[in-house]
Image (cartoon, rainbow, N blue to C red):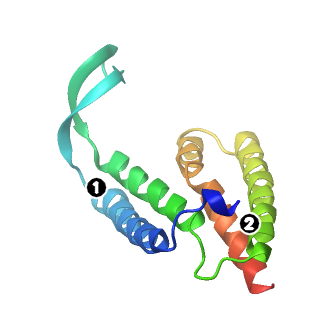
Amino acid sequence: MNTFLLPYRFKWIGTFLVLAGSVGLICYLWFNFILMLPVFAILSSFLEMKYFTIITTNVADELIMISLLTGFFFIAWSKEKTETEGLSRIRSIALSKAVLSNTVFLLFSILFIYGNGFVAVIFLNLISPFIFYLGFFLYLKRNL
């Protein structure tokens, strides 16, 4: 599994991206942060269906999600300072627990959360596997 891990310095880049995304998310949710830019869209369905077109839209939410997703990916898949064989085993246990936990989380959400709350859960599901994985990994590493 070590061959698929990024160098340790990516953990710091990931931490910066998660912090920047979190600040952006707070600004977006509480202060209604808007960043209007023209973007290329394969599909746009705001007022009418458009394919392969340029539209002007608020890209703040896309930038925030890209920052959070990339940051959590870098943190989760970066080597530790001293990578050992025991950490490889802990990574695989944490990954299996994260998949199971995320599946239970989604099933619970499907059964009990509706409307805009469920849309929020779907957006949260973009990063929740990484959050579960990092939580289990850090917990198992501490108890090693």
Q: Tell me which amino acid carries mark 2.
A: Arg
Report crowding for label 1: few under 14, some 14 to 19, many 20 or more residues within 10 A (C-alpha): few
Q: Secondary structure at mark 1?
A: loop
Q: Which residue is mark 2?
A: 91
Task: Kindly tell me whether residue 90 is visible in this rendering.
Answer: yes
Say whether marks 1 and 2 touch (CB < 8 Å).
no
Looking at the image, residue 88 lies above or below residue 129: below
Assign a secondary structure to mark 2: helix
Q: Position of residue 78 (x, y in %)?
A: 56, 67
Q: Is residue 4 above or below residue 143?
A: above
The location of residue 144, given as percent across then percent down, is 81, 84
Residue 67 drawn at (x, y percent): 39, 57
Reading the chain from its start, which is encountered first: label 1 or label 2? 1
Q: Nearer the viewer, mark 1 or mark 2?
A: 2
Q: Which residue is mark 1?
A: 32
Identify the image quadrant of residue 2: bottom right
Disc 1 from disc 2: Cα separation: 38 Å
How many marks are shown on the rendered structure? 2
| Quadrant that contains the N terminus | bottom right
* Residue at position x 78%, y 61% in the image: 92
Identify the image quadrant of residue 17: bottom left
